Each structure stands twice: as C-alpha cells, then as structure tokens.
Image: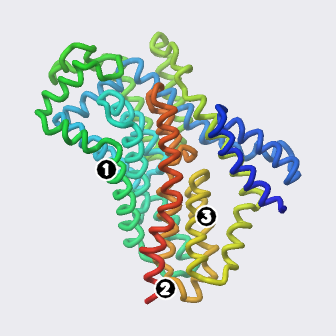
Amino acid sequence: MSAEVVALVVLVLVFLIATVRSINMGALALVAAFVVGTAVFGVEVSDVLGGFPANLFVILVGVTYLFALARNNGTVDWIVHRAVVAVRGRVALMPWVMFVVCAAITAIGAASPAAVAIVAPVAMGFAARYRINPVMMGLMVVQGATGGSFSPIGIFGAITNGVVDKSHLPGNPAVLFFSAMGACALISLIGFLTLGGTKLLQRDRESPKEQVTTLARTGAGTGSAGSAAGDPEPADDDLPRLDAQRSLTLVGLLVLAVGALVFDLDIGFLALAVAVALTLIFPSAARGTVDKISWGTVLLVGGIVTYVSLLEDQGTVKWLGDGVAHVGAPLLAAFLICLIGAVVSAFASTTGILGALIPLAVPFLQTGQVGAVGLVTALAISSSVVDCSPFSTNGALVVANADVAERDNVFKRLMTWGMTIMVVAPVLCWVILVVPGSLS
C-alpha cells in the first residue's frame, strides 16, 4: 500500500473514530498528522507543524474575542435591535439580508473569510435572540460570501479568470459569476425552506410588532442588555442606548471592517488589536471574555487543516490529480476533478484549490472533448459551495460565533450539510455544465 493511500485511509479513520467516540476530531487529527508524517512520509516534526494554520488560529481567536466583548457590553444587542427595526420586525427577511450583505461585500473585492468574520457574529446573535435556526443563518451567510466572491473583481473570480487566461483557455467571467451566485442562492433557498424558513414566514404573517413583542415575552434573547424575559419589546426610542463603551465598540468594529475590506489588513490581528484596546479602556467589561473564545473549534479546525496540509505538502493531492488526468474518458475525468476539488476544499483553502486544479484539467480541455467554460465553472462552484463545512475558515467562524448551547449542534449540522454538498454539487454541476458542452 502506497504512502498516499495510507494517508487517505487514516484521514477516513479520523472521521470515523471521532464520530463514534467522544473525542475532539482536531486533537485526533494532530496525532494522526504526527504519526503519518514521521512514520509514513518520514518528515520532521517541524515540517508537520508547518502545516498548522496559524493565520486561521489568529482569525478565530481574534474575532471571537472581540465579539465576546461586544456581547458583554451590550453592543451586539444594540445592533440586533436596530436590525429588527430596519426590517420592521419581519424576522424572516434577516437571513436574506445577511446573504445579500455578505455577497455585496465580497463582490467588491473583500476576502470571503473577512466578510464572514464581520457579519457572522451579528447574524448568529440575531439568530439566537429571535429563535432562527443558527445552521440556516450560518449557511446563508457563508453562501452569500461565496457567491459574491466570483464577481469579476471578487477574489475567487479574479483567481479563476486569471488561471484560465494564463492557461490559454476560453473563459466567460459573466457565466462564472452568475452560475456561482445562482448555485449559492439555490443552496440558501433549500436551507431556508428546510431549516425553519416556512415557520418564520408564518410568524411574520402576524403583525410584526406583535411578533417581536411575543418573542420578548417568551424570554427569547441573549439575556444581556435589551428587553428582559417577561417584558414587552421596547419601542424604538427605548432601545439599548449608546453609552461610551458601546460607542467605542462600534467604532472598533468599523475600524475592523474598513481595515480588512479597504486596506486589506489581517483581520485576525486587527480584531485582536481592537479587542485589546477595548480591554485596556474598559477592563471591567472584559472579565470572562477569554473563556468565551471558541477554543474547541480552534483545536478542531487547526488539527484537521494541519493533516490536510501534510497531504498537500507530501503530494497526495497532486497524486490524486495526476491519476485523474490520466483517466481515458474525458467526461469521467471532468467529474472526478470536480469531486476532488469539492472534497479537498471542504478541509483546505478554496483559493489554493482553484489555482491548483484548473491547470490539471488543461490536458483534456485542450482536446476539445469537454467544454472549457462549463468545466471551469463546474470546478469553481464545486470547490467553493462546500465552504459551509465547519473545517473551512467560513464554516469555522459560524461555529465559533454560535451560541454556546448550540455550538455542538451547529458543528454537526454544518458538517452534514458540507458533506452532502461535497457529493451533490459535483454531480449536479457535471450534469448541468459539463455534459451539455461535451455533446455539442
């Protein structure tokens, strides 16, 4: 049995063992990375640790630390109340508002994780307060960010179109963008309808003001500043007011958004800097916030990504790609490369996958037996819509910002959605985008 096969079998075992036994999958993956790296691939421990996602670690810690502070001092409640006022109490609109906001932010060039890191904490706080399924809310936030990223000036769109041009393949940026946005909107619609959206619509058929009052009286909410259980929802003039602490927190969140989206600063370190500054100014509000950092999620994602990085560094992913490139049937090869893109991207960088797998398809694309525009679009969609997986940066941010009581459930449900999309998306993309091009 080759080293590549052994490494892939161990990865499957990590998932099976962690699913059957009560053990953090990240811890198990770190042990597996050490054993496989040193015993199977014969690399040094330092090389294994080189795959640890330090940037993702800082993002998760920094963002969850900052928004723990914002929850403690009532800023998140203030934002959530204002969001309710903005949609006139129609709670069912909020998941779609978050979808559109994320799509707009990434469509103008922001990195997908940056958009999710900024929007997800507010979206998940709103979901907790108004009894919206957190899995549905998180799914729509991630899919909005993913769809917008394929605009011609979006990160994914620029990378994909750039690789296509460099490989001298025919491309169509408009088809890529609208196909990706359509796929993300369809996944969001399915998630909305199957995860409680119809119940939200039924609630909204009541008077919006009556609905919000009912929610407050039944005790729905975070329990921080705002209406207390048993009290009616405050009128617009009675919403939590902006004191000095909340005002500075809002300024800090604005600095985070502008720094990450406009000046392309590292969002993890920037979030940490804002959090530390707020802690220095208001030390009393910072008590207990470090404990609210999602350390379990950090360990889980860090371990899985470290193991997958080991596979990439040791050529296992390339080995899979080369095997696909030598498949005799172009249509089968096209399907397999879309499937590989989906599987690997669910645990690794979508940006890296888009840049690595499209060139692997060049040999059989140049034969003309498979349409280049269709396959590139199918590969791009298959490799990106799985970003709701809790092992990707975006999915991990959703899990990390979910209510503590719901975090395990959100992780398991997002994993189910991610794994389902990982299988279904390549099949549908292949049937809709690749097969017609090969028959024409």
Q: Is residue 77 left or right of residue 33?
A: left
Marks counted in the figure total: 3
Q: Is residue 219 above or below residue 84?
A: above
Helix, strand or loop at mark 2: helix
**Between marks 2 and 3, how big is the CA–CA gap?**
20 Å
Residue named by callout 2 = 438
- Going by the image, does 300 lie left or right of 43? left
Q: Position of residue 196 (x, y in %)?
A: 31, 41
Q: Residues within 10 Å of mark 2 (few under 14, many from 20)?
A: some
Element carrying mark 1: helix
Q: CA distance from mark 1 to mark 3?
A: 29 Å
Q: Quadrant of the C terminus?
A: bottom left
Most foreground residue, 112 or 344: 344
* Residue position for label 1: 100
Report x, y in % for residue 122: 37, 34
Residue shown at 56%/31% (left/top)? 61
Callout 1: few (<14), some (14-19), or many (20+) C-alpha neighbours within 10 Å? Answer: some
Tag 3: residue type? Ile
On the image, the x and y values in percent for residue 214 come to 19, 24
The residue located at (49%, 46%) in the rendering is: 113
At label 3, counting other C-alpha atoms closer than 10 Å, the crowd grade (few under 14, some 14-19, many 20 or more) is: many
Q: Earlier in the sequence, mark 2 or mark 3?
A: 3
Secondary structure type for disc 3: helix
Query: Can you tell which of label 2 and label 1 is closer to the viewer?
Result: 2
| Amino acid bearing label 2 | Ser
Residue 83 image-quadrant placement: top left
Residue carrying label 3: 340
Of residues 96 and 50, the one nearer the viewer is 96
Q: Residue at coordinates 56% horizontally, 58% vertically from top-left?
A: 351
Q: Which x, y percent locates residue 327? A: 67, 79
Is 308 left, or right, of 398 in this rendering? right
The earlier-in-sequence mark between 1 and 3 is: 1
